[in-house]
């Protein structure tokens, strides 16, 4: 079956601009993890849908703002992560937790704003939703109901797994030369594992491809019945990996210690849990039609204090392993992107790739500004 997407969906800057407006500025987008914002005035900055976003802990409540000072449009926080009150570095204005201007140095002598102007100046605030330790932001003035994007069952599972996060995390990012959708498609496509990861990931699956196939096939749906909520899914598979004895004794763990858990959070996050002890979160952040920033956050797991150092150190080999596997994917995806051209032939999907066709239909309806959840909801099946 032919893919509903054509090469222009991976090449065109016009389509990219439409994605930014109708997908990334409309949907709930994963923005960060709570432990990174645990303290009063802890903050992180990032970009979502082309908009600079500031997440700030204001006396225990996490708020999201457009990171733009209403005076001369300077970013209010300039570092990626930090802890500081909302005070603009350019002329020292400070802000209240609701984004309104709190103080302006030498206001009376230099600015002389009338009362109405003074009151109207404000940092724009966005909707925030916490799911366990995962923080989501919606830039839309009328945010989509959270349940329209994620089923309650899915929300529950993500919340439950993320509550095992410890207080530390490793964060890194890289810029790669491919369209963000290739990464989504790659995560769903289990059939590349024996070929792209023959020595890294594939040996970790004891049952071989047959096992991978039946355990990693996401919801088998057709284009007619697909909804936005179907694009976020959970699955898990047995792993040929034995955690260190001390980890089992000292650390809390999610689920079973011989499994790989996977929560795909549409549109652009693959949240995983390896052996119950580590939680790599991969985000495919679109920078342009042909560039994706891969943001990887690996939180530690909740531990007894004595073991914090030991466990933090144990994250290093895991992160290196993650990058080894990801590099194999990145090489493949950059090769695809490099050879794409507008008049390239359409992609021919086989039976096992039916979910990719369904996903493409939802994506296109989102792109056109249509609701992807117009169909009546149906009884959902558990895949655990
Ligand atoms: S630009 Fe922020 S205080 Fe002037
Ligand atoms: Fe892969």
Image (cartoon, rainbow, N blue to C red):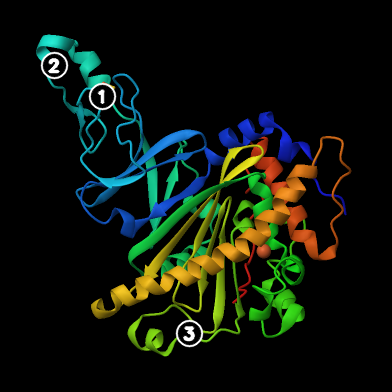
SS class, disc 1:
loop
Q: Which mark is residue 243?
A: 3
Residue depth check, mark 3 versus mark 2: number of the one nearer the observer: 3
Could you say which quadrant of the image residue 286 lies in?
top right
Q: CA distance from mark 3 to mark 2?
A: 60 Å
Could you say which quadrant of the image residue 96 lies in?
top left
Residue depth check, mark 1 versus mark 2: number of the one nearer the observer: 1
Where is the C terminus found, in terms of image quarters? Answer: bottom right
Q: Is residue 208 above or below residue 191?
A: below
Q: Which mark is residue 29?
A: none
Q: CA distance from mark 1 to mark 2?
A: 14 Å
Q: Is residue 86 above or below residue 377?
A: above
Q: Is residue 43 left or right of residue 344?
A: left
Q: Position of residue 136 (x, y in %)?
A: 43, 50
- Determine crowd level at label 2: few under 14, some 14-19, many 20+ residues with C-alpha closer than 10 A: few
SS class, disc 2:
helix
Q: Which mark is residue 107?
A: 2
Mark 1 close to ligand 1, CB under 8 Å = yes
Q: Which residue is mark 1?
A: 90
Q: Position of residue 363 (x, y in %)?
A: 68, 45
Q: Residue at x 13, y 16 (%)?
A: 107
Task: State which image quarter holds ligand 1.
Answer: top left
Q: Residue at x 35, y 23 (%)?
A: 73
């Amino acid at each position: 079956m032919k893919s509903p997407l054509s090469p222009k969906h991976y090449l065109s800057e016009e389509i990219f601009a439409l994605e930014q407006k109708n997908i990334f500025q409309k949907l709930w987008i994963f923005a960060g993890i709570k432990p990174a914002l645990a303290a009063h005035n802890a903050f992180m900055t990032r970009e979502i849908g082309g908009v600079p976003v500031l997440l700030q802990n204001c006396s225990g409540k996490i708020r999201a703002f457009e990171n733009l000072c209403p005076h001369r449009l300077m970013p209010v926080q300039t570092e990626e992560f930090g802890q500081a009150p909302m005070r603009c570095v350019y002329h020292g204005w400070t802000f209240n937790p609701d984004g309104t201007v709190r103080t302006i140095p030498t206001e009376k002598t230099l600015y002389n704003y009338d009362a109405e102007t003074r009151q109207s100046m404000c940092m724009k605030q966005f909707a925030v939703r916490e799911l366990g330790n995962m923080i989501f932001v919606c830039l839309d003035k009328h945010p989509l109901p959270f349940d329209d994007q994620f089923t309650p069952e899915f929300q529950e599972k993500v919340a439950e797994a993320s509550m095992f996060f410890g207080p530390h995390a490793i964060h890194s990012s890289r810029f790669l030369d491919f369209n963000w959708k290739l990464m989504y498609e790659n995560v769903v496509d289990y059939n590349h594992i024996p070929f792209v990861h023959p020595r890294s990931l594939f040996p970790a699956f004891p049952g071989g491809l047959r096992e991978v196939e039946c355990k990693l096939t996401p919801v088998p749906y057709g284009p007619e019945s697909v909804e936005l909520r179907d694009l976020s899914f959970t699955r898990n598979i047995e792993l040929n990996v034995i955690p260190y004895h001390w980890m089992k004794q000292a650390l809390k763990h999610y689920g079973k210690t011989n499994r790989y858990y996977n929560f795909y959070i549409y549109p652009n996050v693959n949240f995983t849990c390896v052996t119950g002890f580590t939680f790599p979160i991969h985000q495919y952040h679109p920078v342009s039609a042909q560039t994706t920033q891969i943001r990887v956050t690996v939180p530690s797991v909740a531990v007894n204090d004595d073991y914090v150092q030991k466990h933090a150190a144990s994250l290093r080999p895991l992160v290196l392993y993650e990058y080894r596997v990801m590099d194999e994917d990145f090489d493949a995806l950059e090769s695809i992107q490099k050879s794409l051209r507008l008049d390239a032939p359409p992609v021919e999907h086989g039976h096992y790739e039916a979910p990719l066709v369904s996903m493409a239909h939802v994506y296109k309806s989102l792109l056109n500004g249509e609701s992807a959840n117009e169909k009546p909801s149906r009884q959902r099946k558990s895949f655990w």
